[in-house]
């Protein structure tokens, strides 16, 4: 919550307790054919003020490269008084601002979302933020920080000149999170290739990958759809997976191949993965555990795996 060796007072854990800061888990949704659909946030660790998680789409239709992403959050402050004046972080008549800083390191995109003002006399107040990320902007993960910053220093008294006085100065972080929106985030890693004379689809699986550590993304595992194939349009990739029986068959078959390949490469670690232990967040192994525990895929035999995957996708129609 605080910054070391700051030349001016900044937010600390006592301030956060005194102001009664409370935040809800952020919400995520997207639009398709002018309709909005919610995304599911699966939290893998932490709490509302510091967590990591991943986004999944129950419709299996959302991809950050082809759909927008609408972010929203709500937070509350019950008493702002202690942020101002003596023992605070700003002059008594200053105006503080609330903002969300975001960064998507894989795409090297970043920005700031201002969404509220705070003055000394504020009591219980609720603040809401919303922002639309256009398709193609985000890759990998989305890191979010809710910060307090100095919006207006007001007219500092002579005894308040030790506070930060430059508008825009960041005075502390209230909460932070990292949400994976690629690979695990969209559940099924799919790319479009142009390969004349080749099959409609194929699965890439890096046999040198360590499933316990290496991420479940296109670098190590990917379903590749061939736009040069005469049946490509029948996949209806730009609309929704549920509109194309062919697409459902392709994804079902491809995911069967991926799970079987992961099982072969995991060897003796397979049972640990099924029990949710021994792997890194965002890894291939974590994705397999997600398929088993959340999507209810039966991996006890190859036949049951194929059947449960097919049943899962058929329910998406």
Image (cartoon, grey):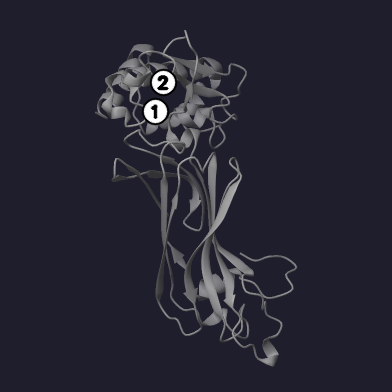
Which residue corresponds to the image point at 62% horizontal and 18% vertical from the top-left?
208
SS assignment at label 1? helix
For residue 67, the mark is: none
Q: As rendered, which of 140 and 193 lies closer to the eye?
A: 193
Residue 187: where, in percent of width, then height?
Answer: 43, 32
Q: Residues within 10 Å of mark 2 (few under 14, many from 20)?
A: many
Left or right side of 193 for 5: right
What residue is pinned by disc 1?
292
Element carrying mark 2? helix
Q: Position of residue 28 (x, y in %)?
A: 39, 49
Residue at the (56%, 31%) spot, across then down: 215
Earlier-in-chain disc, 1 versus 2:
2
* Whether residue 196 can be seen here: yes
Say few, some or many: other residues with alpha carbon within 10 Å of mark 1 (under 14 / 14 to 19 / 20 or more). Answer: some
- Using the image, tell me which numbered label, if any, was put on residue 255: 2
Vertical relation: 11 (above or below) 71:
below
- Foreground of the two, 248 or 80: 248
Which quarter of the figure has residue 174? bottom right
Residue that sits furthest to the top in the current view: 197
């Amino acid at each position: 919550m605080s910054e070391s060796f700051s030349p001016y007072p900044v937010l600390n854990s006592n301030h956060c307790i005194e102001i009664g800061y409370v935040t809800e888990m952020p919400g995520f949704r997207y639009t398709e054919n002018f309709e909005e659909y919610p995304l599911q946030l699966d939290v893998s660790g932490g709490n509302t003020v510091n967590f990591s998680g991943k986004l999944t789409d129950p419709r299996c239709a959302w991809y950050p490269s082809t759909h927008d992403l609408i972010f929203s959050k709500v937070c509350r402050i019950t008493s702002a008084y202690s942020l101002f004046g003596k023992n605070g972080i700003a002059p008594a008549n200053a105006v503080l601002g609330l903002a969300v800083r975001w960064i998507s390191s894989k795409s090297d995109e970043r920005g700031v979302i201002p969404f509220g003002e705070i003055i000394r006399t504020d009591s219980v107040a609720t603040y809401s933020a919303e922002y639309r990320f256009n398709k193609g902007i985000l890759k990998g993960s989305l890191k979010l920080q809710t910060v307090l910053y100095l919006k207006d220093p007001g007219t500092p008294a002579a005894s308040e000149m030790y506070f930060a006085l430059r508008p825009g100065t960041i005075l502390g972080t209230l909460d932070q999170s990292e949400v994976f929106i690629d690979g695990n985030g969209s559940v099924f890693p799919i790319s479009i290739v142009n390969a004349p004379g080749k099959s409609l689809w194929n699965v890439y699986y890096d046999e040198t990958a360590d499933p316990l550590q290496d991420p479940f993304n296109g670098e190590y595992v990917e379903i590749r759809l061939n736009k040069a194939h005469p049946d490509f349009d029948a996949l209806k990739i730009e609309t929704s997976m549920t509109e194309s029986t062919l697409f459902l068959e392709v994804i079902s078959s491809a995911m069967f191949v991926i799970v079987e390949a992961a099982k072969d490469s995991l060897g003796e670690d397979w049972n640990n993965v099924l029990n949710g232990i021994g792997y890194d967040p965002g890894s291939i192994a974590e994705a397999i555990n997600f398929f088993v525990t959340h999507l209810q895929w039966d991996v006890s035999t190859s036949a049951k795996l194929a059947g449960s995957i097919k049943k899962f996708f058929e329910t998406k129609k």
